[in-house]
Amino acid sequence: QVQLVESGGGSVQSGGSLRLSCIASGFGYASYCMGWFRQSPGNEREGVADIDTDGITKYEDSVKGRFTSSQDNAKKTLSLQMNSLKPEETAMYYCTAVPETCGNYLNPGRYGYWGQGTQVTVSS
């Protein structure tokens, strides 16, 4: 049974930083894509970043240069370092996974496994 458990959310002021982590268990695939999505009330789920088995990353345009996704394959841990956070980035952040290569776009419909989410709140 695949489980994704996020941690690291919290409250920060505008310009601050947070580091999210996601631990995957029961995910024994040799090739996969893992990603981060976020959703705020009244809005659709939005892709933030993804990373494939080889460590190749892709980011949503608004977070490029500020967010960094990384993974520890041995520990099955995914991380998202978020710097220079903005109030409009307040949302629930979700870790996701799919046992195939990452696509060209951050499409939530491709991902079959989701964590429960961790709340990020950025105050102005």
Image: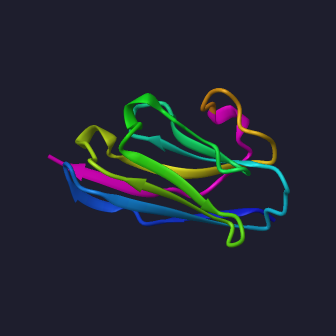
Q: Residue 116 is drawn in which quadrant?
A: bottom right
Q: Residue at x 32, y 51 (%)?
A: 83
- Residue 51 % position (x, y): 63, 46
Residue 69 at x, y percent in the picture:
52, 51
Q: Is residue 53 above or below residue 104?
A: below
Q: Is residue 104 magenta?
A: no
Q: Eyeballing the image, is 90 above or below 19? A: above
Residue 79 appears left or right of 114: left
Quarter occupied by residue 71: bottom right
Q: Count of labels shown?
A: 0
Return the residue nearer the eye: 80 or 24: 80
Residue at image point 46% right, 50% down: 68
Nearer-the-camera pick, 23 or 72: 72
Residue 115 is inside the magenta segment: yes
Give the magenta part as a residue range: 108-124
Residue 7 in the image, given as x and y percentages of width and height: 48, 67
Left or right of residue 9, residue 114 in this image: right
Task: Identify the residue shown where x is 72% and y is 35%.
Answer: 110
